[in-house]
Image (spheres, rainbow, N blue to C red):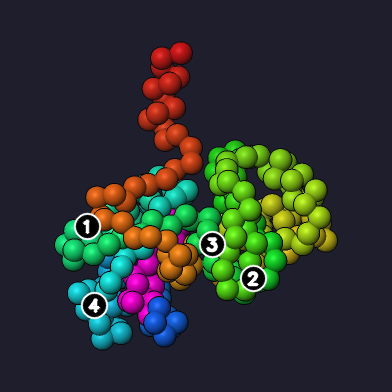
Amino acid sequence: MLLLGIDTSGKTASAALFDSDNEVFLASSSLYTSKTHSQVIMPIVKDIVAQTGKTMADIDVIAVADGPGSYTGLRIGVAAVKAMGFALDRKCCGVSTLEALAYNNIAWKGTICTVMKARAELVYTCTYKSDGYGLEQLCDERIISCDQLAEELAFGGTEVLLCGDGAADFFMTYRSPMFTIAPPQGRIQNACGVCLAALSKEPVTADELEVSYLQKVKAEKDLEDKNK
């Protein structure tokens, strides 16, 4: 199966092409950018597909990080994948950004905690157990305070690998011999993790693909404040 993965959930626009039958990434590209993802993601996709000598019609499934993350980035990524799914008549797969980040560090055998910046002192987080090949999710995906997360991990009693764009700040603030921080390439979103996470998911039709924010968007918050 030829799997195209896309991640636009953060500052990185990333795409990867994975041959699951041979367990080979044929191509991947990531761009840490201040540009709108809508400007860069499709050129990246077209480039990696062309570089491998494949065509868009060769792709079997298209996967995307569907949240949490940047509201605008998520909408752009999911919309792009839905459009390709409709145009190519292909199934799509939404993957948790937190899980994809953990899969970027799948070689770590033990506990992996993804820490993504949300707002103020809050983070998106989830904890997984890795055997080096796959992940077991140990808790629900949540948006909680850094203090609460630090307390929970401290009482966990096991060494934890921290990843995600909030991992460095968390590691520096709550220094502990139980915490190991992932290397720079393992802390930011990458479509390779999206591809690996998608292998254990059931693809859906393009019209079934949705964004998962984990928190209310600004328009919803403003409406609630107005109605109070």
Q: Nearer the viewer, mark 1 or mark 4?
A: 4
User: Residue 227 location, x and y as percent?
Assistant: 41, 14
Which residue carries the number 4 mark?
Answer: 58
Q: Nearer the viewer, mark 4 or mark 2?
A: 2
**What is the three-letter code of the residue carrying label 2?**
Asp
Q: Residue at x 36, y 63 (%)?
A: 63
Q: Which one is in front in this view, the residue at disc 2 or the one at disc 3?
A: 2
Amino acid carrying mark 3 in the image? Leu
Q: Which callout, 1 or 4, points at the residue further toward the start of the chain?
A: 4
- Amino acid under disc 1: Ala
Residue corresponding to mark 3: 101
x then y, percent, for residue 174? 77, 51
The amino acid marked with disc number 4 is: Asp
Magenta: main secondary structure equals strand
Distance from disc 4 to disc 2, alpha carbons, whole Å, reads 32 Å
Disc with the residue nearer the chain's start (1 vs 2): 1
Q: Specify the label residue 65 is tagged with.
A: none
Q: Quadrant of residue 219?
A: top left
Looking at the image, residue 55 lies above or below residue 74: below
Q: Residue at x 44, y 27 (%)?
A: 221
Q: Over which residues does the magenta segment extend?
A: 1-19
Residue 46 among those drawn in magenta: no
The CA distance from mark 1 to mark 2 is: 35 Å
Nearer the observer, 159 or 116: 159
Dot placed on the residue nearer the N-terminal end, 4 or 2: 4
Say whether disc 3 or disc 1 marks the residue closer to the N-terminus: 1
Q: Residue at x 74, y 50 (%)?
A: 153
Q: CA distance from mark 3 to mark 1?
A: 24 Å
Mark 2, other Cα within 10 Å: few <14 / some 14–19 / many ≥20 = some
Q: Which residue is mark 1?
A: 83
4 vs 3, front mark: 4
